[in-house]
Amino acid sequence: MLKKTVRVLIVDDSASVRQILASILGDDPGIDVMASASDPFVAAKRLQDELPDVIILDIEMPRMDGLTFLRKIMAQHPIPVIICSSMTDQGSDLMFEAFEAGAVDIVPKPRVDTRQALLESSTRLRDAVKSAARARVRTRSERRTVVEAKLTADAIIPPPVQGRSTVTTERIVCIGVSTGGTEALCDVLEVLPRNCPGILIVQHMPQGFTAAFARRLNGICEINVKEAEDGEPVLPGYAYIAPGSRHMLLQRTGRRYHIAIKDGPPVSRHRPSADVLFRSAAQYAGSNALGIIMTGMGDDGAKGLLEMRKLGATTRAQDEESCVVFGMPKEAIACGAAQKVVSLAQIPKEIMLWHNSSQPVAVD
């Protein structure tokens, strides 16, 4: 059986951007750029003849902005849409409006200033397109390029070891999530009480958006939500979002946990990487950690979650029915990393049941 080629429509008012995007995607034999359009009106005419599997859409365009066009698409022909924009923190509110309107992912416009930047941008874009093609979208109202080896968490943190001299009994929750995660995390965090344990979250998101994402969640949640900072302590009743394009690790000094933010290469093609966070939790929290892997494409987090389970942590994976993309959880389940598979609605309940179920144990 032949593998299905993902057909893509590019909508951007810049001819040079359309050319760069088409070139990057065209280098992947699994992706076919069926057409490009200079604005939503041209795109709408193209959609009358043929529907793509994925649309790549800019936000700032003449005649009609991308957000308005996105809402029209979702109301008439729900198609997976990826927002590709150069807007960063100053435009973050528009970005989250796009997620609420039905966009499945957001990627920055490819960087061409260095070979490494272009390589990472290209890989991220192709992965996003393939992920979006598998996404579940619902009606809303209103030639191959050689890439670098897929690194493991070894590139950032050594494998976990036992036998540390200082004990702790604090409990920690670690979450890894990608495509579909902005809305899923909202569903989880907004119902958690202030007495929940400290939560560390890796959400695959570009640099510049995570701070705004954390502020947005903080405004609707009872718990405190913030972008993680290097060296800050992990406190109960707080959720910490890993900064875009940087790895986040759990570390411990004495009996207290704190956060380390590190640069480094992408791990499992992501930075931040859930594998890195999960490995650090396995090493420093052991059986006092709960690891959860949620909706997303690829396998980031599966190996790290398995390391957590092997060192005594409790592990959970989101079920297929409630995932936008059942990729990361599927891989975690397949390798035996998840002790239990639960729906999105069950995840906050699992966190509190685990937190209140028994006394934490002292770990070295």
Image (spheres, rainbow, N blue to C red):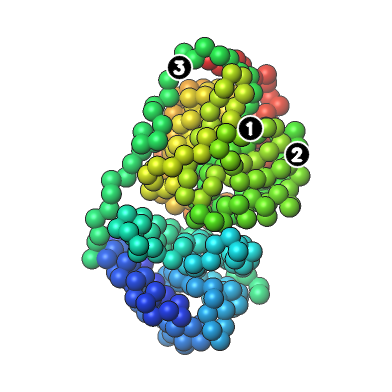
Q: Secondary structure at mark 1?
A: loop
Q: Quadrant of the N terminus?
A: bottom left
How far from the left and from the top, in percent, is residue 335? 40, 35
Q: State the image coordinates of residue 310 (x, y, percent, origin top left).
A: 45, 24
Determine the residue positioned at 28% across, 63% down.
28
CB-based contact (under 8 Å), mark 1 and mark 2: no
**Disc 1 and disc 2: Cα gap in Å?**
16 Å
Residue pointed to by mark 1: 234
Q: Position of residue 150 (x, y in %)?
A: 32, 45
Rendered position, 269 above or below 235:
below
Q: Residues within 10 Å of mark 2 (few under 14, many from 20)?
A: some
Residue at 38%, 59% (x, y): give it.
121
- Residue beneath disc 2: 193
Tell me which residue sits at (68%, 21%) in the image.
Answer: 358
Q: Nearer the viewer, residue 118 or 298?
A: 118
- The number of callouts visible is 3
* Kind of residue at disc 2: Pro
Locate residue 293 relative to residue 353 in the image: left or right: left
Residue of label 3? 162
Q: Earlier in the sequence, mark 1 or mark 2?
A: 2
